[in-house]
Amino acid sequence: MEAMQPDPIAAIVDQWKRERPDLDAAPMLVIGRLFRLTSALDQRLRPPFAAAGLGSGDFDVLAALRRSGAPYALSAGELSRTVLVTTGAITKRVDRLEARGLVARSVDRSDSRGRLVTLTPEGVALTDELIAVHLDNQRRLLAGLGEDERARLASLLERLALTLTSDDD
Amino acid sequence: MEAMQPDPIAAIVDQWKRERPDLDAAPMLVIGRLFRLTSALDQRLRPPFAAAGLGSGDFDVLAALRRSGAPYALSAGELSRTVLVTTGAITKRVDRLEARGLVARSVDRSDSRGRLVTLTPEGVALTDELIAVHLDNQRRLLAGLGEDERARLASLLERLALTLTSDDD
DNA sequence: CCATGACATCTTCCATGGAAGATAAATTAT
DNA sequence: ATAATTTATCTTCCATGGAAGATGTCATGG
C-alpha cells in the first residue's frame, strides 16, 4: 500500500469531467479532500497510542474521562455520546481499558442500572502524558498553515458543521 | 447512540483549558472538527449505497473504475493506491462486487501475475446512477456555505494536504 | 403493591479492514 | 538456463465497531 501524488482529488474531478461532462464533481474538492485529509491525519496521529498499546478509539475514552474533571467518572451512555460510537463499542473499549488497569467500573449509587467508568491513577497518568504528545503532534501537522489560515479553516469547518446539524439530525 | 449539541469541539477545548491550563488545545479546533465533520458527512452520504446493497468502500472501487474510462479496467494494485486501502481489502471488495455481477476479474495478458478488474455493463449502469445521486447529496450537504466559502475551504484543505505530503510520507 | 413499559448496559453475531505470510509469476544476475 | 529477488495478488488471522436482542433496574399507573 503506497502513497499518492499531491492533490489527487483535483485529478479525480478532472476524470469525472471527462467521463461524465453532464455532472459537476466540484463538491468533491471539499468533501473528497476532507476524507483524504482526515485519513492522512489519523494515520499520523496514531503512533503514540499504538506505542502505548492503545487504539485511538480507546484513547478517546480516556481523554473524555480526563477532561471531564475529577473524579474522572462518566457513564457508558455519556461516553457513547461524547465519542460518537455505540454503547456496545464503549463496552468493548472499557473492557480493554479495564483489563489494562486504566479504568475501573463501579455501580452508580443512584441508579444501579448504570455503571460509572472511572480513571484509575494509572489511567490519569497515562492520559496526561499522551494528551500532551497528541496535541504537540496535532500542532506540528498544522504548522504548514499560517495562524490566520488555521483560524479561517477552523471557522469554516465550524460553520459547515453547524449547517449540517441545523438541517436535520 | 444519540447526537450532540452544536459545536461540541469548542466545549472540549474549554474543558482541556480548565483541566490542563498548561496545554494549548487549539489544534483541536481544526483537527477535531475535521474528524467530527467527516464522520457526520459519511453517515449522511451512506444511505444510497446501503440501499444498493453496497458499502461505501465498495462504491469507491466502482467509482475508481468508472472514472478511469473505457474499458473500465484497473489492477488490484492501482485500485489499492487510488482508494487508499490495502490490497487485501481490495481483494475482498472485489470479491463482493464480483459476486454481485458488478465487476469481473481477468488475467492481465502482459503479466499473468496481475488481474484486471473490469466493470460489467451492470456495474457501469449502477455506478453511473449512484455517482449522480452521490454528487447531488454532496452538493446538498455543502449548500449551507456560500460559493466563496466553499472555494476557500477547498483551497485551505488542499494547502493543508500539500504541507502534509511534503513533510514526510 | 404489582404489572407494564422505559432505560442502561452488555452480549452476540456479523461485516469490514489491516498485517503479515503464502503463492505465483516476472525480472535480474550469474 | 537457472537461482535469487522482486512484484502482484490472495489468504489467514485478528481487531474493531455496528445492529439487534438479552438482561437487569427503574418509573409509572392502576
Image: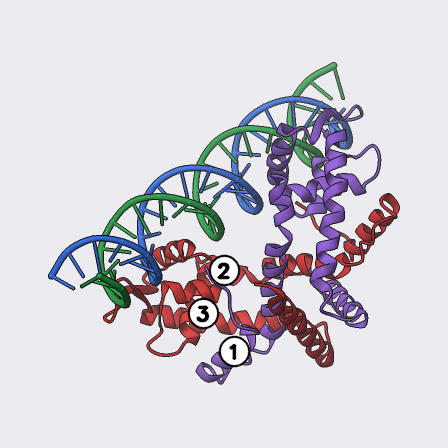
Chain colours: A red, B purple, C blue, D green
Q: Amino acid at mark 3?
A: Ala
Quadrant of the rendering where the C terminus of chain A is positioned: bottom right
* Quadrant location of the N terminus of chain A in the rendered image: top right
- Give SS at disc 3: helix
Residue lying at 85% horizontally and 51% vertically, measured from the top left: A14
Rendering coords of residue D19 (x, y %): 47, 47
Residue A29, given in percent of the width and then of the height, sits at 77, 59
Residue holding disc 1: B11
User: Callout 1: residue from which chain?
Assistant: B
Find residue A63 and name its label: 3
Query: In the visual, does A36 lie left or right of C21?
Result: right
Label at residue B50: none
Distance between the Cα atoms at labels 2 and 1? 20 Å
Q: Which residue is mark 2?
A: A56
Left or right, A157 with reference to A52:
right
How many neighbours does mark 3 have within 10 angstroms: few (below 14), some (14-19), or many (20 or more)?
A: many
| Left or right for B106, reference B41 | right
Task: Let me know if marks 1 and 3 both belong to one chain.
Answer: no
Location of residue A99 with respect to A163 vertically, above or below: above
